[in-house]
Image: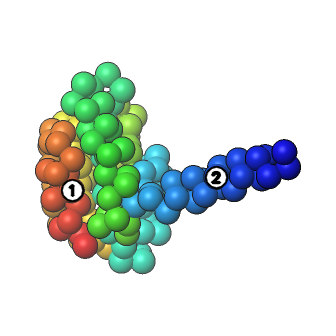
Amino acid sequence: MLSRPLTLVALTASLFLLTGAAQALTIKPFTRAELTAAQNAGMPVAMHFRADWCPTCRAQDKAFNTLKADPALDKVTLLQADYDQEKVLKKQMNVRAQSTVIVFKGKTEVARDVGSTEPAQLKAVFSHAL
């Protein structure tokens, strides 16, 4: 009987490790510090201007969650900014619509997309920073 609980613990630990290893695209809430750190390090970072009320943004969220498991995007961080609250940031980045994705390689903007909801399309946008 002792081996069954140990097997369960080992299986649970293995699944936890595999799930962690499968993470590729990192998704975080926007903070100025996070954006600045990624840009100063020359890392690929993307901004997603989203709103909870926006159906396109919700569809994009589903696509981004699908891309979390794509190892080709393991260096990309996606920062999600509140479209309704980040008025100064929107102006600085010339964002005119929710569902806007801006991709940077370091401090240089390399791609911009508005409204794409398919994982393959969004992956192509992110790939400009790799």
Q: Using residue 1 as the reference point, say whether residue 83 is left or right of it.
A: left
Q: Is residue 107 visible?
A: no
Q: Nearer the viewer, mark 2 or mark 1?
A: 2
- The residue to which callout 2 is attached is 11
Q: Earlier in the sequence, mark 2 or mark 1?
A: 2
Dot 2: element: helix
Give the amino acid type for the residue marked by disc 1 in the picture: Lys
Q: Which residue is drawn at the image coordinates 15% and 59% (left, top)? A: 124
Q: Residue furthest front?
A: 1
Which residue appears at 52% of the width and 58% of the height? 18
The picture quadrant where one finds residue 57 is top left
| Label of residue 62 in the image | none
Few, some or many residues within 10 Å of mark 2 (<14, 14–19, 20+):
few
Q: CA distance from mark 2 to mark 1?
A: 32 Å
Relative to 56, 37 lies left or right: right
Q: Which residue is mark 1?
A: 123
Image-quadrant location for residue 24: bottom left
Q: Quadrant of the N terminus?
A: top right
What residue sits 64% from the left and 52% below the top? 11
Element carrying mark 1: helix
Give the residue displayed 76% in from the left and 47% down from the top.
4
Query: Residue 63 at x, y = what percent?
Result: 27, 42
Q: Amino acid at mark 2?
A: Leu
Residue 62 versus residue 106: which sits nearer the camera?
62
Tell me where residue 110 appears, x and y as whole percent.
17, 66
Q: Can residue 4 be seen in the rendering of this structure?
A: yes
